[in-house]
Every structure is written in C-alpha cells, then in structure tokens.
Amino acid sequence: MGTNYYTQTKKCPTCGHKPEGIHLGKSSGGWTFTFQYNGGKYYKNVEEMKSWLKGKKIEDECGKNVSYKEFWEMVEEKQKDEKNWIHASRYPSERDFLIDGYSFSDCEFS
C-alpha cells in the first residue's frame, strides 16, 4: 500500500476554477519515495523541487494537509532506510530513472 502526494496550483482569480493537483510522487512500503518527474515542467531534481514547492500546499491522496517539513522528513527517512528499494535502480527505463540518487518516474502512476 502506498500514499500519493500532490500540490495544488492556485485557482483562477477570475472564474475560481481550481486546476487538478500536480502529482509529486508516491511513498510505498519497502521503497524509497518515487518522485513524479512531470516532464521536467516544474523541477528537474530534488533541490529544484524543494525550492519550487516552498510555500505551496501539500496534500496526500485523501486530502490531508502535509507540511513542507513533514513531507521532506518522510522523503529523507525513506531515502536513508537501507532496507528500502530504489525503484528506478531496480527497474531502470527511459521513464524510470535516478537523479542524484533519488527515484523519479516520468509516466503516470498512482
């Protein structure tokens, strides 16, 4: 079982339409966190993501708010657990790859 994480873009000030959330990635038991690359549209590595995500609302797939600090603590805890597998190193492909030791996927997953 795993949990997906999202951030919301701001709603339109004119019509109030709220776009769909941007998938940040997934935390699954026995695996390090897998980041959604989103075609590199928002960030190209974890450091860029940290900067881009600062000040944005983070939610899990059930709509529970997760603080920026809690999110990154969870990511780093999973990253340093030697028992966790790194998906992109175990199953590398054109769409599943490592950036600076972190697992990224550029395909839709949930």
Image: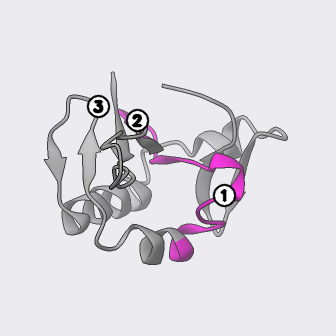
Residue 80 percent location from the top left of the image: 40, 62
Mark closer to the chain start, 3 or 2: 2
Mark 1 lies on a secondary structure that is: loop
Residue density around tag 1, few if under 14, some if 14–19, many if 20 or more, within 10 Å: few
Distance Cα–Cα, label 1 vs label 2: 28 Å
Which numbered mark, 1 or 3, is in the foreground of this view? 1
Inspect the magenta stretch and tell me whether residue 71 lies in it.
no
Q: Residue 59: x, y in percent?
A: 25, 45
Specify the label residue 30 is tagged with: 2
Residue contact between numbered discs 1 and 2, judged by CB atoms under 8 Å? no
Kindly state the secondary structure of the residue where label 2 is placed. Answer: loop
Residue at 62% x, 68% y: name it.
45
Identify which residue, 11 or 31, lies in the foreground.
Answer: 11
The image shows residue 87 at horizontal and vertical percentages of 60, 39
Write down the region rendered in magenta: 24-48
Which SS class for mark 3? loop
Instruction: Left or right? Give the position of 94 relative to 20.
Output: right
Q: Residue at x 15, y 39 (%)?
A: 64
* Relative horizontal placement of residue 15, taking residue 25 as reference (left or right): left
**Residue 61 - label:** 3
- Judge the density around disc 2: few (<14), some (14-19), many (≥20) Cα neighbours within 10 Å: some
User: Residue 11 at what x, y percent from top left?
Assistant: 34, 49
Q: CA distance from mark 3 to mark 2?
A: 19 Å
- The residue tagged 1 is 41
